[in-house]
Image: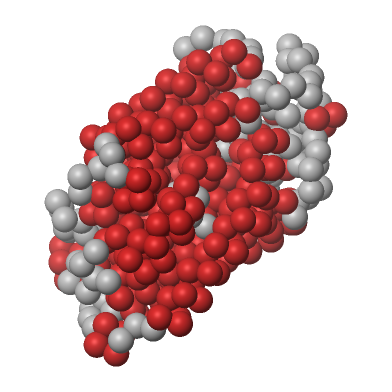
Amino acid sequence: MAKTTARADQPVETTGTVEKRSYDYVPLNERHGRPRHLFSVWFGENIHILAVVTGSLGVVLGLGLVWTIIAILIGNVLGALFMAFHSAQGPKLGLPQMIQSRAQFGYHGGLLPTVIALFMYLVYGAAGIVPCGQALQAVFGGSLDLWIVLCTIPMVGLAIFGYNQVHRAMRIQTAAFVVLFAIVGIWLLVHGIPSPQLHAGHFIWGAFLGSVSAYAVWQISYAPYVSDYSRYLPPDQTRNAFAYTYLGTNIGSIIPMAIGAGLAALYPTLGTVGAIHKLAGGVLTFLIGISIIMPNSFNVYGGIITTLTIGTNFREFKSTARLRVVVGIIVGGLMMVAAIVGAGNFINNVYNFLLILLYFLIPWTAVNLTDFYLVRRGQYRTDDFFAKNGPYGQWNWTGLGVYIITFLIEIPFMATPHFTGPVGHALNGGDITWIVGTVVAVPLYFFLDRARLRRQRVVS
């Protein structure tokens, strides 16, 4: 049975401006908020310039506008299922996402997916800073490096303030930028895409499968974040958490991605920022450029929680506001440096990163969701996540073994510019790794871990 009382050594969260909790459990007397706010959290988190950039990938790969939009729809609708199921874990457990991995991989074994998630936050955060800087440079000129620094500062500040302020910021983001992107979308339709560009490109299996995978991993990559933003909700709101998250993230992603695909078809040589500037002018380019600032704070926020979670494996300590500030500045600084270094070949870097990220995330999310929904069915003791020598053990070789086996099975199906497996070659560069990884990991973990738990009950 899930334990829902506060741990004795933790203070009750106050109403101060800086959130004090990070990796730790949210007791019932601090639960608050409404599930419907998760719609604006995930709508607002997706409706920004990086989603526009990502939407252009299919056209850039030669797929054509119509097939790119079909890939956008399929990838988002399927990929969002993973992250919405993770969102429903937050109210039930009252914990951030990555510390839950200790139940599947062990107290120290959970470091493997947690370190991978931290790397994801850093690179994704950098990827979000770059188009913000590029947009401001396109409008005002000057040094791209300077604009990258200025874009980073408010992202770090919002993440440090924490959960309640992030939720409020996303409501503002949703209200403001749905209007802005609607204007750009209508402008794009009124301007029209000439027939040669509209029908440019053609269906290519490899490009189509690669695009679907990229759009799916856009959603799947939120899996390490998602219960961070639902963990303060009351425990009876799991179904509502799923529904509002799923709707918000799909609608919020598909709109800007479709706009990005249209811009790439209309101005194939200009890049996303250049296309926005040519179509809509300086003011809208500026506004769309800064649309990433509040959503990209999620990467800093997740980076703070994950860094502190990693730290608890080596030393016990309490979450404090001062600790959040220090770690937030460090995490944001690393993202800023990575953005400056990686700004040169941005669109290719984003695509390659999304594919590589997929290979590491699928085994983790499949194992985590299988454990939660099929093996333990949501029944966990909160204190067990913090017990180094508790029932989860220091290393759960069943979970780790399934993760490694799944990753190895994925290799023949991989398709990247640097490595393509034999199946990937046979599919003309098409990538179905995320499907294969799920099909392998779910039943393998289900049967092996149930057998392990039965053996434990017999011994005890």
In this view, which residue lies farthest toward the bottom? 195
Residue 448 % position (x, y) = 48, 45
Whether residue 197 is visible to the viewer of this picture, yes or no, is yes
Where 78 sits versus 457, above or below?
A: below
Whether residue 254 is visible to the viewer of this picture, yes or no, is no
Q: Nearer the viewer, residue 133 or 210?
A: 133
Residue occupying image coordinates x 36% and y 26%:
334
Residue occupying image coordinates x 37% and y 31%:
149
Q: Is residue 390 left or right of residue 268?
A: right
Q: Quadrant of the N terminus?
A: top right
Give the colouring mode of the picture. secondary structure
Residue 46 % position (x, y) = 52, 55
Q: Is residue 433 left or right of residue 42?
A: left
Residue 181 % position (x, y) = 52, 64
Q: Is residue 208 left or right of residue 440?
A: left
Count of marks overlaid on the render: 0
Residue 433 % position (x, y) = 32, 59
Q: Nearer the viewer, residue 135 or 43?
A: 135
Q: Quadrant of the C terminus?
A: top right
In this view, which residue lies farthest toward the right? 29
Q: Nearer the viewer, residue 201 or 264?
A: 264
Where 275 sits versus 455, above or below?
A: below
Residue occupying image coordinates x 85% and y 29%:
29
Q: Nearer the viewer, residue 403 or 285?
A: 285
* Occupied quadrant, residue 152: top left
Residue occupying image coordinates x 39% and y 83%:
192
Where 3 sits versus 49, above or below?
A: above
